[in-house]
Each structure stands twice: as C-alpha cells, then as structure tokens.
Image (tube, helix red, strand yellow):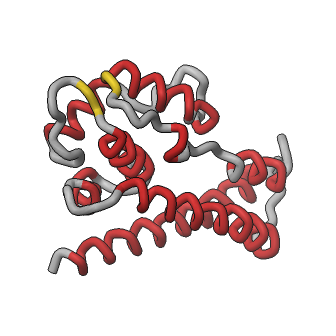
Amino acid sequence: MRKLQEIMREVFSDRDLSPEQIPTLDLYMDQVLTLFNDGLSDNKRHPEDKLLTKTMINNYSREKLLSPIQGKKYTHQHIMQMLCVYQLKQLLVLNDIKQLTGRDDIDFERCWRQFLDTKKVLRDFIPAQLSEKLSADLENPSERLALCLALSAVASYMRRLCETIIDESSE
C-alpha cells in the first residue's frame, strides 16, 4: 500500500475547470456532459464513473438548483452554476444546495474564481497540517480505520459548518 503522503499528493492534485475553459457560447446538454466528464476526469474515483448525467441536470433544473433554461442550450452562467452544484453535492443535500445556487442574483463565475483561489490555498495548507498531526501505518487495518474515522470526523465538521451557515442565512 502507498504511503499517506503519496495518497494526499494525488488527492490534493485534483483538476478543476476554470472559467476560461468554459465556452462563452451556449452549449447543448451533450456538450455540457462532455465538458464536465472530460474536463474533470481526473476527479473520478473509477474511470467508468460519470460526474454529471442528463438525469442529474434535469433533476437540478426541476429542483430549481439552476436558473431556468431557455430552449435547449445552457449559457456560460448555467455552466458556472452547474460547477458550483457539482462541488456542493459532494457534501450537501439538494435543499441546502438550492438555497445557495437556486438564485439569479449571484455572479457564479466570480464565486467560482474566488473558490478556486481559496482551494489553491487549502491545497497547500491542509496536506501540511495533516502530515504534521496525523500518522498511521496504512498496512495495519486498525490504524487505517482510525485514520479514516478521524478524516470522516473532519469532513463531518465541515459539512455541519456549511449547514449552519446556510441555516443562519435563511433565518
């Protein structure tokens, strides 16, 4: 089994789509799917995984996580909005995501740029902190479980922080 440092290096080198990679012209659904599945392919756990499907997009539209679609094409703003939904759905339930993204008064490109800048800082900060504070023999099943429990607790804290921020903004 690989060392924790090597695994962290791989995990923290995921890819993101930058606003410059999003075409300014409107795209059909199949083009949006290709953009996501090709542009974010390094983020898949398994090569056959789909990051975004027609059903997902239709559900996001129906649940009003996305601004209404005009015709059959998705604008640059829609795609930026979908990127935000894609990121948030890794951690939050759809109702929480809807409160954040189901709006027309947000500049999603600006939010995405700010997110990418913050994520870059976190990519440098988090592995260093984890390396300093955590150690485990990943060959040992008990140590591997203990480490995964600790990491899941951190993820739970972050999810609860997001939920509290959402709840307090809707009061």
In the displayed structure, 119 sits above or below 133; it is: above
Q: Quadrant of the C terminus?
A: bottom left
Quarter of the image for residue 120 reads bottom right
Residue 160 locus on image (x, y percent): 39, 71
Q: Which residue occupies 45% across, 34% down?
A: 23
Q: Nearer the viewer, residue 18 or 133?
A: 18
Q: Quadrant of the N terminus?
A: top right
Left or right side of 68 for 54: right
Q: Which residue occupies 33% across, 59% down?
A: 107
Q: How many numbered marks are there?
A: 0
Q: Which residue occupies 54% across, 38% down?
A: 21
Q: Nearer the viewer, residue 41 or 113?
A: 113
Quarter of the image for residue 69 reads top left
Left or right side of 84 for 35: right
Q: Nearer the viewer, residue 104 or 101?
A: 104
Q: Nearer the viewer, residue 81 or 169?
A: 81
Left or right side of 127 for 158: left
Q: Which residue occupies 24% across, 75% down?
A: 167
Residue 3 locus on image (x, y percent): 85, 50
Residue 159 locus on image (x, y percent): 42, 66
In the displayed structure, 170 sits above or below 8; it is: below
Residue 47 locus on image (x, y percent): 60, 23
In the displayed structure, 24 sits above or below 38; it is: below
Quarter of the image for residue 103 reads bottom left
